[in-house]
Image (cartoon, rainbow, N blue to C red):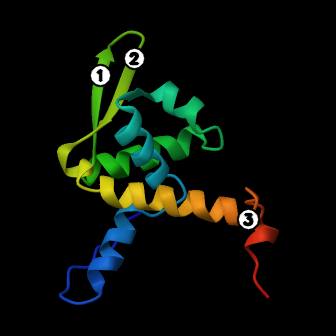
Amino acid sequence: MTRKIYNCEKGCSVESTMQIISGRWKSVLLYHLMFEGEHRYSELQKTIPGITRRMLSLQLKDLEQDGLVYRKVLQEKPLMVAYGITDYGNSLKPLIEMLYHWGEDFNKKNSGRLEEESLLYY
């Protein structure tokens, strides 16, 4: 699947940024790698229990392709891989931190409920 990244002068920059960090897990992965440091693949899987192995692999590949995350082979047999944040990825730290704090406030206002029903506004 090919992603379309737009590069225009006004408005599209927000769309480009959202295309890079959006998805259910990318911002979560960025958060863990930024604020907790390098993680092995299996550690990331345990840290984010809702993510499937396939989705974790796809999201990490996208982030690596976009230059936000690096992949390091620690051991050949058995294969052991670690992921970390690049300097370019760290440039998103203020944004990810703001998303974290906004989410904390939202959770407090909604008594920590994140079920779909609590997100519906009539």
Question: Would residue 29 be found to the left or right of residue 49 on screen?
Answer: left
- SS of the residue under disc 1: strand
| Three-letter code, disc 3 | Asn
Q: Which residue corresponds to mark 2?
A: 79
User: Can you say whether 29 is above or below 77 in the image?
Assistant: below
Badges 2 and 1: C-beta atoms under 8 Å apart? yes
> Horizontal and vertical percent for residue 27?
45, 54
Q: Which residue is mark 3?
A: 110
User: How far across and down, in percent of the image, does residue 54 sit?
Assistant: 54, 42
Mark 1: few/some/many CA within 10 Å (<14, 14-19, 20+): few
**Helix, strand or loop status at disc 2:** loop
The kind of residue on which mark 2 rests is: Leu
Point 36% across, 46% down: residue: 61
Secondary structure found at label 3: loop
Seen at 46% across and 41% down, the residue is 57
Rendered image quadrant of residue 115: bottom right
Q: Which mark is residue 73?
A: 1
